[in-house]
């Protein structure tokens, strides 16, 4: 089928929905300057209409008395998260902070039965009780350092009630990870304290059974423990037990203690009849000097503390320990970029570092101008139509004078260079060491009234997108800009942080990055992880998938119990509300009616949930409501009732695939909407997703999809008739690829996990889900999707665009004329730079900096067609040629001698090369322009041609790229007549990517530049 016949469906998710992006005709790359070329100081700070930045950094002291009426220590909650508002006395308008039950063991993530941990047992009133072996609980908000750089945890411990001579212990564990098992010698433990019943004390760090410090106090029935941690250069710990102080230095491997730590309390009991208690029973339960209540209060924000990441890595800590140092539910990774306008370049190694020995627990820029880009966009939410970005910038460490600067920018381009003055930047702020401020919009600077010089500057930027197009900027508490903006503000804005220095030895740092909500795939989990009916029969399978999911759905049907919330991480549970909102028309009927008491039922549910409300990240409307017989008006009413009862929770609506094909009304209060359609392939899902976008009630609504999990009979319609485990695994990979193309897709909710034997039943599918899930939960960097560009022969200019089509930079190189443009990573993995081939002389010229010639050499013969690739998996790009006269490829590994020679194709055919199987090696292919058929070969030595793929129209130019970040390159075409790039799925003519870029007469480019 020719491409134009596919455009009515396949391209809906691509070019037809995108803004036109033409390469500007005369933009030159300009290096960043030390001082801004801005308007006069004190220029207008706007008209005051901008949105108020969300406070993303709220903290408070924490105290839990554990005082609770013993009658409330009952099955199934056992008092742990009961009455927290009374026990903790939170500030007005805030809830108590709940606890999460975890295993407390070294060998399993599965928490023990509910009654292993109780509050105010009748025998031990007003205390936290651990019974029956080993277990632990996590406090749902991390401890954070105060203004002096310290935090303190205090409690009263009886390690073994009634014993003062044994070696069983209670533990206080501090770790950056909210996914820890809570065992004191776990590898993720930053600081663990054990106190035995006999008065022995031990401190542990980073795994291993050997403590780095030990001490003793006189045995007694209770131990009043206070642990103060200094996050400063002294690395000191002050441990006080029953009034005896111990000053302890950190072990040699700790440069600084992290400034944000989750707190776990636990017990190790060798006798099943023994118990451990925390609290003195008279009001001193657990105290923490300061906790961060914003990092975990909802499923939306991203928080990066930059704390504790290993720095001695190839990326200098930039993408290390992301899910640990980011205490929020979602995580995101970064790309180091040049910070300079023009074509993309890798900054020098070490230009961007996290937790360096010289500048611990921060993001630092120690080598001149450079930047980092957050690889998931900040995104506006439904309720406000806005988003906020917050960071603490130190332009020059140790200086409050001069015009060297740090920057925070929000870009339209998914692959910008991070330059605050680049054209793709919708809103950027440059903060000088002396407090001078410059606002940038689309490359245009405006000088703002500065703020008093300070060592650091706390910056918050709020952007109201859509029709509002307003922004507000606060620096150290002062609003320096508020009003409408000249540049288009993106609903999905890519955040970059940068620095510029004029002198060697200067260092910029950034700390405490917070974003109110992220787009891109950030949530991964299962539908029906716990169901009172078949197939789960009340079993909670969440622990089985805990290491690679972060957002699981719990069905309740008519089960009124809520004990599963005790095991949820903060903001990590999704619950259905059918029990409160609908009733079957007849017993057992698929069709339902609205429950006339729905509004009150929902309010009653909120009361029963109590302080476990912070465990809930999202709530579901009736699944496939229209298929269940609800009318649009009834669905709208249900959405309003749920929003009233759960005002700050993400509201999810799911459709069946028939309604996704139509225009089923979606309430404007819904945050995320999706549909299911199982085992039908990427084309069917992609088309319905594109169609769904056309009838969203708000452009700020996000999307979700439901990958299938099994081919087991009766589970997912369409998957148990002739579908194999391998088929289902392949479908899962397609869902991930769809999400990689579209930052509006934020959630993959796999359809059902049936129990611990699922890995044995469908091992390939489970392995695929684990790979995808771990990449989402841990923000594991994945291959960057290909970006597009053009070469303009009329002036010898190269122009680049990000993957989402936004123009990012231009330069002139190679002389124009009949020079053939090239792109590749000539020195090793990383960003592609440019080159040219002069066919008259068979001369290659390659650049490492997109400006100067780094290498000139001859290869091939005049009239050859140049090629570049990594022919042997060396990790760098070298050259080759295709000789039309004999249809032979000549490929070199050293840019000098021929390593591979292979004949492929017929006269008149066009050569193509790509990494077709994702193994890191580029192999050959040919394209027949008469039939528009591609023939891919998986070897550079023998002919091993895959079946031909027809794609494109006559006159198209063949291209290739890794369009959705899978690690595999697939085919595509560039259509000179309309300057559109079209790309296909693997072994398919399904259009998966489309962008318009360039002008008539341009030559297409594809590469990795963002």
Image (spheres, rainbow, N blue to C red):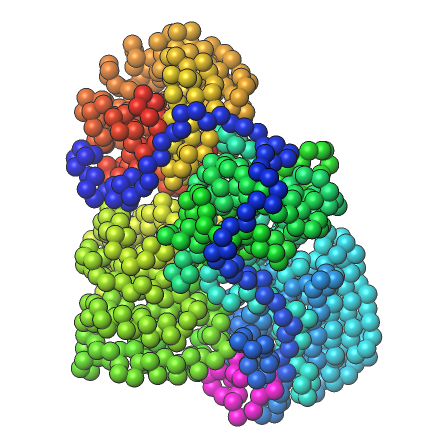
The residue shown at (38%, 60%) is 382
The residue shown at (71%, 69%) is 152
Residue 135 image point, x, y percent? 57, 74
Q: Quadrant of residue 403?
A: top right
Residue 452 image point, x, y percent? 69, 51
Q: Which residues are magenta?
A: 66-83
Residue 994 image point, x, y percent? 30, 37
State left or right for residue 825 relative to residue 790.
right
Above-or-below relation of 509 to 295: above
Q: Pick the residue in front: 173 or 975.
A: 975
The residue shown at (70%, 66%) is 151
Q: Pick the residue in front: 395 or 128.
A: 395
State left or right for residue 521 relative to residue 751.
right
Is 392 a magenta residue?
no
Residue 648 image point, x, y percent? 44, 69
The residue shown at (19%, 55%) is 661
> Does the magenta stretch mainly form a helix, a strand or a loop?
loop
Is 69 a magenta residue?
yes
């Amino acid at each position: 089928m020719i491409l134009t016949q596919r455009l009515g469906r396949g391209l809906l998710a691509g070019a037809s929905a995108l803004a036109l992006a033409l390469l500007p005709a005369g933009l030159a790359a300009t290096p960043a300057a030390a001082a801004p070329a801005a308007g006069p100081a004190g220029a207008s700070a706007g008209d005051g209409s901008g949105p108020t930045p969300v406070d993303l950094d709220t903290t408070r002291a924490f105290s839990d008395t554990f005082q609770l009426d013993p009658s409330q220590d009952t099955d199934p909650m056992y008092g742990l998260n009961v009455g927290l508002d009374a026990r903790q006395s939170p500030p007005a308008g805030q809830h108590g902070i709940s606890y999460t039950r975890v295993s407390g063991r070294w060998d399993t993530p599965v928490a023990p039965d509910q009654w292993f941990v109780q509050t105010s047992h009748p025998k031990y009133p007003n205390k936290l009780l651990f019974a029956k072996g080993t277990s632990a609980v996590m406090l749902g908000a991390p401890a954070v350092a105060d203004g002096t750089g310290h935090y303190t945890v205090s409690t009263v411990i009886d390690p073994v009630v009634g014993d003062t001579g044994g070696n069983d212990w209670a533990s206080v564990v501090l770790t950056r990870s909210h996914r820890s098992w809570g065992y004191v010698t776990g590898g993720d433990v930053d600081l663990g304290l054990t106190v035995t019943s006999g008065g022995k004390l031990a401190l542990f760090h980073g795994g291993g059974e050997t403590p780095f410090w030990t001490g003793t106090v006189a045995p007694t029935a209770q131990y009043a423990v206070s642990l103060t941690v200094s996050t400063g250069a002294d690395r000191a710990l002050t441990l006080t037990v029953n009034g005896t102080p111990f000053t302890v230095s950190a072990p040699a491997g700790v440069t600084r203690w992290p400034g944000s730590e989750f707190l776990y309390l636990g017990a190790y009991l060798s006798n099943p009849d023994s118990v451990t208690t925390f609290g003195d029973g008279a009001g001193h339960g657990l105290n923490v000097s300061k906790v961060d209540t914003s990092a975990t209060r909802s499923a939306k924000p991203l928080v990066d503390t930059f704390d504790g990441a290993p720095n001695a890595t190839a990326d200098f800590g930039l993408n290390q320990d992301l899910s640990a140092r980011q205490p929020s539910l979602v995580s995101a990774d970064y790309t180091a970029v040049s910070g300079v306008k023009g074509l993309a370049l890798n900054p020098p190694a070490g230009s961007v570092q996290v937790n360096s020995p010289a500048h611990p627990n921060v993001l630092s820029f120690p080598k001149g101008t450079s930047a980092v880009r957050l690889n998931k966009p900040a995104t506006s939410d439904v309720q406000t139509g806005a988003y906020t970005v917050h960071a603490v910038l130190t332009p020059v460490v140790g200086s409050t004078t001069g015009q060297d600067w740090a920057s925070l920018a929000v870009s339209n381009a998914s692959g910008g260079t991070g330059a605050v003055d680049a054209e793709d930047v919708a809103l950027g702020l440059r903060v000088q060491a002396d407090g001078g401020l410059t606002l940038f919009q689309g490359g245009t600077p405006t000088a703002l009234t500065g703020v008093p010089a300070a060592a650091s500057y706390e910056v918050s930027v709020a952007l109201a997108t859509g029709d509002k197009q307003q922004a507000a900027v606060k620096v150290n508490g002062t609003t320096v800009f508020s009003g409408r903006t000249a540049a288009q503000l993106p609903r999905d804005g890519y955040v970059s942080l940068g620095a510029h220095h004029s002198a060697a030895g200067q260092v910029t740092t950034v700390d405490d990055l917070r974003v109110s909500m992220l787009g891109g795939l950030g949530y991964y989990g299962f539908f029906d992880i716990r169901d009172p009916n078949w197939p789960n029969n009340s079993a909670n399978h969440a622990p089985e998938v805990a290491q690679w999911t972060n957002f699981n759905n719990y069905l309740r049907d008519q089960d009124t119990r809520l004990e599963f919330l005790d095991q949820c991480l903060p903001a990590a549970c999704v619950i259905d509300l059918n029990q409160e909102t609908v009733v079957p028309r007849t017993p057992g009927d698929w069709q339902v009616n609205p429950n006339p008491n729905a509004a009150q039922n929902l309010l009653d549910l909120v009361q029963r949930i109590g302080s476990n409300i912070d465990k809930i990240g999202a709530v579901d409307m009736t699944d496939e409501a229209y298929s269940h017989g609800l009318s649009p008006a009834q669905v709208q009413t249900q959405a309003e009732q749920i929003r009233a009862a759960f005002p700050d929770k993400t509201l999810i609506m799911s459709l069946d695939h028939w309604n996704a094909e139509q225009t089923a009304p979606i309430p404007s209060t819904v945050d995320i909407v999706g549909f299911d359609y199982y085992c039908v392939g990427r084309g069917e899902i992609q088309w319905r997703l594109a169609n769904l976008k056309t009838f969203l009630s708000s452009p700020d609504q996000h999307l979700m999809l439901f990958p299938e999990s099994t081919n087991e009979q009766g589970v997912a319609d369409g998957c148990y008739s002739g579908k194999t485990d391998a088929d289902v695994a392949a479908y899962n990979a397609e869902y991930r690829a769809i999400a990689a193309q579209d930052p509006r897709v934020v959630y993959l909710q796999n359809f059902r996990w049936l129990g611990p034997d699922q890995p044995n039943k469908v091992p390939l599918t489970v392995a695929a889900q684990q790979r995808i899930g771990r990449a989402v939960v841990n923000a594991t960097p994945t291959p960057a999707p290909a970006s597009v560009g053009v070469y303009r022969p009329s002036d010898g200019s190269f122009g680049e665009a990000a993957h989402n089509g936004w123009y990012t930079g231009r330069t002139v190189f190679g002389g124009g004329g009949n020079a053939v443009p090239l792109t590749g990573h000539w020195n090793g993995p990383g960003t592609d730079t440019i080159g040219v081939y002069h066919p008259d002389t068979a001369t290659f010229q390659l650049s490492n900096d997109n400006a100067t010639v780094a290498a000139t050499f001859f290869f091939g013969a005049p009239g050859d067609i140049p090629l570049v690739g990594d022919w042997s998996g060396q990790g760098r790009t070298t050259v080759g040629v295709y000789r039309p006269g004999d249809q032979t490829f000549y490929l070199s590994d050293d840019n000098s001698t021929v390593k591979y020679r292979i004949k492929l194709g017929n006269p008149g055919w066009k050569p193509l090369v790509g990494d077709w199987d994702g193994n890191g090696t580029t192999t050959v292919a040919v394209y027949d322009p008469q039939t528009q058929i591609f023939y891919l070969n998986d070897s550079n030595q023998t002919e091993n041609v895959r079946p031909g793929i027809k794609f494109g129209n006559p006159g198209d130019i063949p291209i290739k790229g890794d369009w959705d970040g899978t690690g595999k390159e697939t085919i595509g075409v560039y259509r000179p007549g309309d300057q559109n790039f079209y790309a296909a799925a693997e072994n398919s003519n399904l259009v998966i990517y489309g962008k318009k870029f360039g002008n008539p007469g341009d030559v297409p480019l594809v590469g990795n530049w963002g």
